[in-house]
Image (spheres, rainbow, N blue to C red):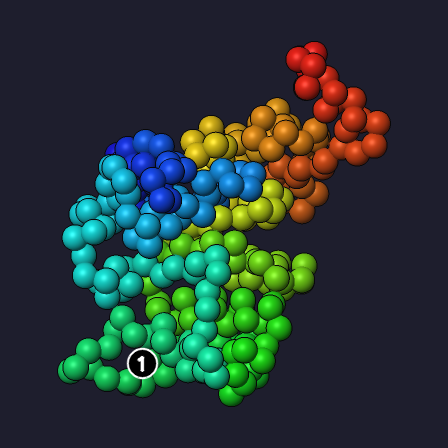
Amino acid sequence: MSDPSRLEARSVSLAYDGTTVVPELTVAIPPGSFTVIIGPNACGKSTLLRGLSRLLSPAAGTVVLDGRDISSYPAKEVARRLGLLPQSALAPDGITVADLVGRGRYPHQSLLRQWSSADEAAVKEALDATGTTDLSARPVDALSGGQRQRVWVAMVLAQQTDLLLLDEPTTYLDVAHQVELMELFAELNAHGRTVVAVLHDLNHAARYASHIVAMRDGRIVAEGAPREVITSRRVEEVYGLPNVVIDDPVTGGPLVVPLRGGAFAARATAAATGLDA
């Protein structure tokens, strides 16, 4: 019998201003997995992550964390159990990198437990892991977009939770830093942390994920191992993108290659006219 999921959505509906974005969705995050949520823009990926993290309360259904409705936990307790990197995070004006990353230790503070050597060590480890140690004394608002993104990741790592939810964590990063960060998440996962990430890059998803959830129009259209989900037909179904899927020469997993020129036009025309087999 497999281990029960630590985090799951049960018949959850998620809405903004009365408009349902995700209707009656059920999904369980496999424990110990590197789960990646993929899908086109505005399909509900980030909305689902917000629901799973308690940033967005369900209009119906329940999000369950460690066997209990997530809404039944105090906020600090949720933050001790899961770390969240939201899509658009804002830092207070003038705050330094070290101070922002230090805020990741807030869930562990109390009237009886103030800043400790363990907190100091957690911040140092997070800065080192994200390559931001040299930035620690600088104001966050003086950094580039890519630097800021790595600092926000450091803050989440400083929480030292074994469940990480990451909404587009490679945003603003150049390709080298994207790969560096994905390797870091893979290493964290290999050491026992469950990682859930929303990604736009299908090939990063295919290379690093152990479990993929593919969404379209607020619903899950497929989930499973990368080779099961990332097929040419499925990619075209989800994204409307003519493509071929080949073996990744490094990992042997699926690698998506979009078609272009005449091939793209022919496939797109066939699909639009109902002639695509």
Name which quarter of the figure residue 114 lies in. Answer: bottom left
- Could you say where residue 261 lies in the image, as x and y percent from the top left? 83, 32
- Disc count in the image? 1
Tell me the quadrant of the picture where the N terminus can be found: top left
- Residue 220, position as x, y percentages in the image: 43, 31
Task: Inspect the image, locate mark 1, and give the three-letter code of the amino acid beneath it.
Answer: Ala
| Residue at far bottom of view | 137
**Could you tell me which residue is drawn at 32 percent across and 50 percent down?**
56
Confirm whether residue 113 shows in the render: yes
Q: Residue at x 77, y 29 (%)?
A: 264
- Tell me the residue that label 1 is attached to: 118
Tell me: residue 80, above or below residue 230.
below
**Residue 227 appears at what percent x and percent y?**
55, 33
On-image quarter of the C terminus? top right
Viewer-nearest residue: 173 or 58: 58
Dot 1: element: helix
| Identity of the residue furthest to the front in this view | 17
Tell me the residue at 70%/29% (across/down). 242
Residue extending farthest right: 262
The answer to whether 215 appears left or right of 57 in the picture is right
Q: Is residue 219 above or below residue 51?
A: above
Kindly indicate the quadrant of the structure image that contains residue 173. Answer: bottom right
Observer able to see residue 32: no
Residue 69 position, x and y percent, is 19, 47
